[in-house]
Image (spheres, helix red, strand yellow):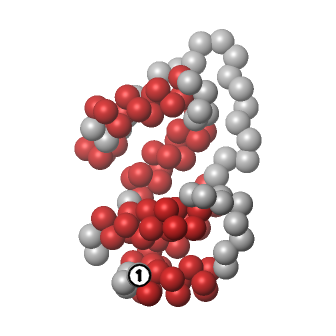
């Protein structure tokens, strides 16, 4: 399976179901039916739902504020292979602006590496 296919399924879900109404309560069967009608294979759909399930399981419950200086995040070699300098800079920007906490950043990195 190509990694783009899981990303395509996720993008389709977010663009068609979650973007306008992130609080909508659409059941999994309806989503699967819509994805099949859109031309995605059952395997791609299963992988995408597995990715989302892991995201929900790994979601930080709370972030404890860190007092004083914050440590610098050094990317692992595998992360550097996946993230170009623009992506690395964007993550740093999101964290510096307070959009992502350190826990959320780690969750984003974990989910990127899982693709």
Left or right: where 40 falls relative to 81: right
Camera-side residue of 2 and 58: 2
Per the image, label 1 sits on a secondary structure element best described as loop
The answer to whether residue 55 shows anywhere in this view is no
Crowd rating for badge 1 (residues with CA inside 10 Å; few <14, some 14–19, many 20+): few
**Residue at 53% from the left image edge and 29% from the top image edge:** 95
Q: Split into 4 quadrants, where in the image is the N terminus? A: bottom left
Residue at horizontal 60 percent and vertical 39 percent from the top: 103
Q: Residue 76 sits in which quadrant?
A: top left
Apparent side of residue 9 relative to residue 52 in the rendered image (left or right) = left
Percent x, y for residue 9? 42, 70
**Marker count (numbered):** 1
Let me know if residue 64 appears in the view: yes
The image shows residue 82 at horizontal and vertical percentages of 29, 46
| 58 w.r.t. 49: above or below | above
Extreme residue toward the top, this view: 68
Residue 51 lies, with reference to residue 85, above or below; the image says below
Q: Residue 104's image quarter? A: top right
**In this rendering, position of residue 115 left or right of residue 28:** left
Point 44% across, 86% down: residue: 36
Q: Nearer the viewer, residue 85 or 107?
A: 85
Write down the quadrant of residue 40 in the picture.
bottom left
Nearest the eye: 103 or 89: 89
- Which residue is depicted at the point 41% across and 52% down? 112
**Position of residue 16 measured from the top left corner of the image (x, y, whole percent):** 52, 67
The residue beneath circle 1 is: 38
Tell me: residue 85, above or below residue 43: above
Image location of residue 68, percent across then percent down: 66, 12
Q: Quadrant of the C terminus?
A: bottom left
């Amino acid at each position: 399976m190509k990694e783009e296919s899981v990303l395509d399924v996720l993008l389709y879900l977010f663009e068609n179901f979650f973007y306008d109404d992130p609080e909508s309560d659409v059941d999994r069967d309806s989503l699967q039916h819509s994805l099949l009608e859109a031309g995605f294979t059952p395997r791609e759909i299963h992988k995408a739902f597995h990715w989302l399930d892991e995201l929900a399981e790994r979601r930080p419950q709370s972030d404890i504020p860190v007092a004083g200086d914050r440590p610098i995040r050094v990317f692992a070699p595998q992360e550097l292979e996946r993230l170009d300098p623009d992506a690395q800079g964007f993550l740093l920007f999101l964290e510096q602006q307070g959009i992502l906490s350190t826990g959320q950043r780690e969750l984003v990195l974990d989910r990127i590496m899982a693709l």
